[in-house]
């Protein structure tokens, strides 16, 4: 079992940027890594996923604004969030699933992922 840990959240004004980091995954195992989010009163939704082949998938609402990557040196999964909008306000969770990412994972409800971090808050004010 992994101990995923998120860092880097916080508060920013609309149009600003934040970067999230996830540690605690194993590089010797082929994982699909990703980010999900959930806002109060809303369903959980996928944000982005990445796997060992560097295949990346994004939910439509963040395409062109968010970028997921792996920092091999620091063993982090990063989520760079630019041009943030108030609707991006949510608790963001790092997730992991053994195997390669499937393109539908990011559009699902997160049930494809066995491992979850505790989450970190991102707040975007207008």
Image (tube, grey):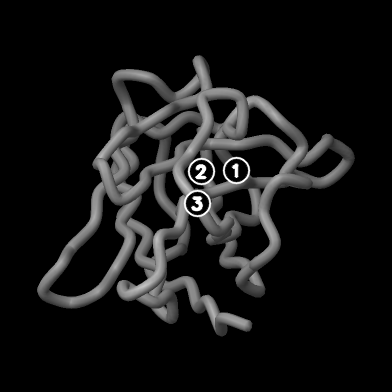
In the displayed structure image, the side of residue 4 where residue 69 appears, left or right: left
Tag 1 near tag 2, CB within 8 Å = yes
At mark 1, the secondary structure is loop
Q: Residue under circle 1?
A: 89
Q: Earlier in the sequence, mark 3 or mark 2?
A: 3
At mark 2, the secondary structure is strand
Which of pointers 1 and 3 indicates the residue nearer the eye?
3
Q: Position of residue 34 (x, y in %)?
A: 48, 49
Say above or below: 70 vs 83: below
**Quadrant of the rendered image containing residue 21:** bottom left
Q: Spot the residue most to the left.
A: 73
**Quadrant of the rendered image containing residue 106:** top right
Query: Split into 4 quadrants, where in the image is the N terminus?
Result: bottom right
Say above or below: 126 vs 70: above
Which disc is residue 124 wearing?
2
Check disc 1: other Cα within 10 Å, few if <14, some if 14-19, many if 20+: many
């Amino acid at each position: 079992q992994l101990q995923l840990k998120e860092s880097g959240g916080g508060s920013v004004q609309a149009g600003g940027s934040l970067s999230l980091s996830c540690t605690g995954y194993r590089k010797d195992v082929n994982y699909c890594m990703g980010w999900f989010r959930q806002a109060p009163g809303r369903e959980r939704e996928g944000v982005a996923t990445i796997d060992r082949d560097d295949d990346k998938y994004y939910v439509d609402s963040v395409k062109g604004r968010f970028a997921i990557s792996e920092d091999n040196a620091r063993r982090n999964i990063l989520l760079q969030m630019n041009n943030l909008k108030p609707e991006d306000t949510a608790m963001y969770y790092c997730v992991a699933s053994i195997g390669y990412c499937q393109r539908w994972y990011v559009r699902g409800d997160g049930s494809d992922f066995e491992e979850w971090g505790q989450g970190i808050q991102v707040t975007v004010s207008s």
